[in-house]
Image (cartoon, rainbow, N blue to C red):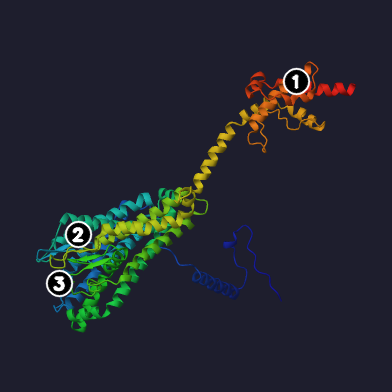
Amino acid sequence: MSTTPPRPARGRPASRARSTGSAPERSRGGRATAVADRERGRRRPARTPTRGTGTGTGLDRLRILLVATMGAVLAGYTMLVPVAALLTGTGGVAVTADGALATAVPLWLGAHLIPVAVDGHPFGVLPLLPTLVVVALVAFCSRWAVLRLGGRVRHDAGAVVASQAGAAAAVAVLAGALLPRDMAVTAPWASMIGAGLVAGAAAGIGVVHACGAPAAWKRVLAGWPGAALAGARVAAAAMLLVAALVLTVALLASASDVADTAERIAPGAWAGVGVLVLSIGYLPNALVGALSWALGAGVSVGIARSGPFGVEPGPLPPFPPAVVLPVTTVPTAAVLVVLLPVVAGVLGGIACRRALGEDAPVVDRVAAPALAAVVVAVGAAVPAALAGGALAGGPYDPVSFHPWAVLGCALLLVGIPAVLTCAGTELARHVPMGGTDRSRTAVDRTRAARDRRRASTVGELVERRRTAGAPARRADAAWDDDGGHGDFYPYPDAVPDEEPDGAGRTAARRAAADEDTTDLDHGDDVDDVDDVDDHGPGDRRAADPTGRRAEDRTDRITRPRDRSRDD
């Protein structure tokens, strides 16, 4: 026996209707509903970080900003404490909590690119890996803060960036005062500005990642600048790959020297762990050096210099990432390494061309890869400037990656291939490519100018043809039909092809025709026209400037024929 489902009572919403079924049916329905809700909850996608409404009070906003800024500072310092304890223990010094906390202070300053002086000797070659970790941490905290504040670029982003930069600058000044006695910050004002810049840049990255680019940026990036950024991303990734490839080849080629150096400075396994951790911290510096070497700028350590085009011998510090530099001889084929940045430029040009489309103008096709090359060159030169520095004033001082040379070489080796790849076909149509003959574009311009001159004189040509005695053409045709003289040219500009000096003959015959028409008025024969050859071309043109004489002559020439027909 089938039962109909219960219907909601009239006058009540379906959600508030009473259930008319039995208790077991209601219980089964409730369990089914609960199971269905749980299934929907399992299939629910992952939630994004909670975005605030932006309607909180000033105290709520201050609390969020304090949590984000102090959380980034304390988290960065806390992560460096175990590293400081490890380095201290592998160096043969007893590890204590106070010692680890004290050692982490200069490490935090170094992570913010603040050089310190040890016993009066400046130490500016700082590892870049802790800097990258700090940047990632500050970007994450800034992203969380701006989302909690409401995610509005104009109202929330500025407060987050300013709070992160100000907190880092203040803590840098405080950390400089807490250094051990044998350490000191070389320039307190520089440390404050440097820490603020690092934290502010990291906060800006996090804010843009959370809120997106402002509307003004989007409008600008909608044109060729957006294509330039696409090409810059591809070219930068290719340059990073080039640096990794060059460093890997150098490590494999000098693996024995690296192992000997590590064993000499760290004879035990525990000491070897400390050298390994320190080498990993300088791995980004080694990548910057490999990129500078691949671009042709080279690397300098003290008086030693190494590059693909030559070397200058000198001592190298006993450190595994430093012994990979060839300072005695360089293979002849090493100059081919400069082709790798050229390949990166070609890839960037292809990316710009695809982003622009096929109908982009030539100016955009040149500007986009040029801007991409500038971005890549600056992105290579800034790390080259940050990775080097003073090295305690010893024989290995200074360590330089030649940032200005890196900038110039990157502009040439990346920019020129990128521009040629993106706009080479279009430039070939507008720029003469040289040679002994005139270029195609020059010929086209000459033809266009000649066509313009012709077009400007069309009216004159028509008027000249009209006034040259066009009705005489009919007389000429009629004379030929009757077997008369077929070589008569009534037009002043008509010259037969078979007569090189046809101009003179035609003028003479026109003059003879004029004389004959005079004779025809007195009853002379038509055949006497050929007897007259002594008149110049000026007589005809002076006597008949408007072409009316041609019509009279036509009538007089045809009149004897009509008269003979009457006879």
Q: Residue 485: percent from the left, percent from the top?
A: 76, 30
| Residue denoted by label 2 | 172
Q: Quadrant of the C terminus?
A: top right
Dot 2 or dot 1, earlier in sequence:
2
Q: Quadrant of the N terminus?
A: bottom right
Query: Can you tell which mark lies on residue 98?
Result: 3
Q: From the viewer's perspective, is residue 556 above or below residue 185?
A: above
Whole-number angstrom distance, CA of label 2 to CA of label 1: 116 Å
Residue at 24% x, 55% y is: 166
**Which circle, 2 or 1, is nearer the viewer?**
1
14, 399: nearer the viewer: 399
| Residue denoted by label 1 | 517
Residue farthest along the bottom direction in this orientation: 268
- Amino acid type at mark 3: Asp
Whole-number angstrom distance, CA of label 3 to CA of label 1: 133 Å
Dot 3 or dot 2, earlier in sequence:
3
Q: Secondary structure at mark 2?
A: helix
